[in-house]
Amino acid sequence: MQKEKVNVGGRVLLLAIGGLFGGVANGLLGAGGGIIMTFVLESVMGEDEMPRRDIFANVIAATLPISMFSTIIYGLRGDLQTERFGEYVIPAIIGGLVGAYLLSRISTVWLKRIFAILVIWSGIYMILK
């Protein structure tokens, strides 16, 4: 089944709505914004126009400013507990570097599988916890 092409104005609107919902999810839950934006980009752009690797890279680039502004707001409200920050932030930065390096070296089939497994696992974990 072939996807219908959305006109340019419709694309901009859909991408903006997806970005808005992604930002709300990221700011509200601390996660999930990237998942929403990945689905929106893939649905609106299609893999012919924006390959999966580019979708993941663009979503990561978009989540950086979202996370930065959310962090500022959390900090101003006193909601950040930074006493043990280095214990998970430094390994997360290293993991981000490793993941970015691996992105161009893993087939898109496996990227899709890894993404799907993480989404499903996260959903099940959140429901059962």
Image (cartoon, helix red, strand yellow):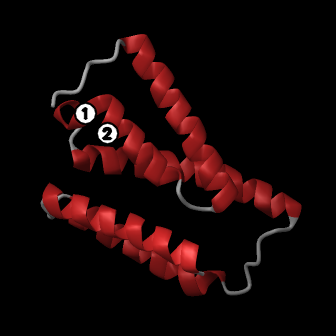
Q: Which residue is mark 1?
A: 46
51 over 25 or under it: above or below: above
Q: Which residue is mark 2?
A: 42
Q: Which is nearer the eye, 129 or 107? A: 129
Quadrant of residue 48 within the rendered picture = top left
Residue shown at the point (41%, 38%) measured from the top left: 40
Residue 67 placement, left or right of 36: right
Residue 49 placement, left or right of 118: left
Disc 2 + disc 1, Cβ < 8 Å? yes
Mark 2 Cα-neighbour bin, 10 Å: few <14, some 14–19, many ≥20:
some
The alpha-carbon separation of the residues under discs 2 and 1 comes to 5 Å
Residue shown at the point (47%, 26%) measured from the top left: 14
SS at circle 1: helix
Residue shown at the point (42%, 52%) measured from the top left: 60
Residue shown at the point (48%, 68%) measured from the top left: 123
Q: Position of residue 107 (x, y in %)?
A: 12, 60
17 over 53 or under it: above or below: above
91 over 29 or under it: above or below: below
Q: Position of residue 18 (x, y in %)?
A: 51, 36
